[in-house]
Amino acid sequence: QTFEARTTSQSENQQFLKEMLNSILEGEGIKWYKLNKVNKVKKLMEDENYRNLVVSRLNKTLEKKVGPDDRIDDVCISPAV
């Protein structure tokens, strides 16, 4: 692939993941994705850069530091994903 094609592909993949994450955060889950889209997510999660993107978007407490004696409360996600 050329550099431009790779950059375009990365941008499209990032946009795809952002849209998927927005639907999850809005409570829609990923049920609405067809099987090929779920496979695409699995494939993208093999890349550490995309995993970091997903984790940073889902982890809203990323800015908070957790000490060794701190307790992290459970968080329910509804509807069940």
Image (cartoon, helix red, strand yellow):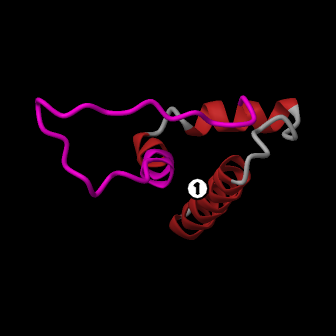
The front one of 17 and 71 is 71
Q: Amino acid at mark 1?
A: Gln
Residue closest to the far bottom: 4
User: In which image quadrant can residue 76 be found?
Assistant: top right
Is 75 on the left or on the right of 16, as rendered?
left
Rendered location of residue 12, percent (x, y): 67, 62
**Image point (25%, 31%), residue name:** 71
Rendered location of residue 46, percent (x, y): 50, 32
Q: Is residue 66 magenta?
A: yes
Is 78 on the left or on the right of 74, as rendered?
right
Rendered location of residue 29, percent (x, y): 75, 40
The front one of 25 and 57 is 25
Label total for image: 1
Q: Is residue 65 magenta?
A: yes
Q: Which quadrant is the N terminus positioned in?
A: bottom right
- 10 Å crowding of disc 1: few (<14), some (14-19), many (20+): few
Q: Which residues are magenta?
A: 53-81
**Image point (46%, 52%), residue name:** 53
The front one of 46 and 70 is 70
Q: Which quadrant is the C terminus positioned in?
A: top right
Residue closest to the far left: 68
Magenta segment, prevailing SS (helix, strand or loop): loop
Is 34 on the left or on the right of 64, as rendered?
right
The front one of 69 and 8 is 69
User: In which image quadrant can residue 5 be found?
Assistant: bottom right
**Image point (63%, 55%), residue name:** 13
The residue under label 1 is 1
Q: Secondary structure at mark 1?
A: loop
**Image point (43%, 48%), residue name:** 59
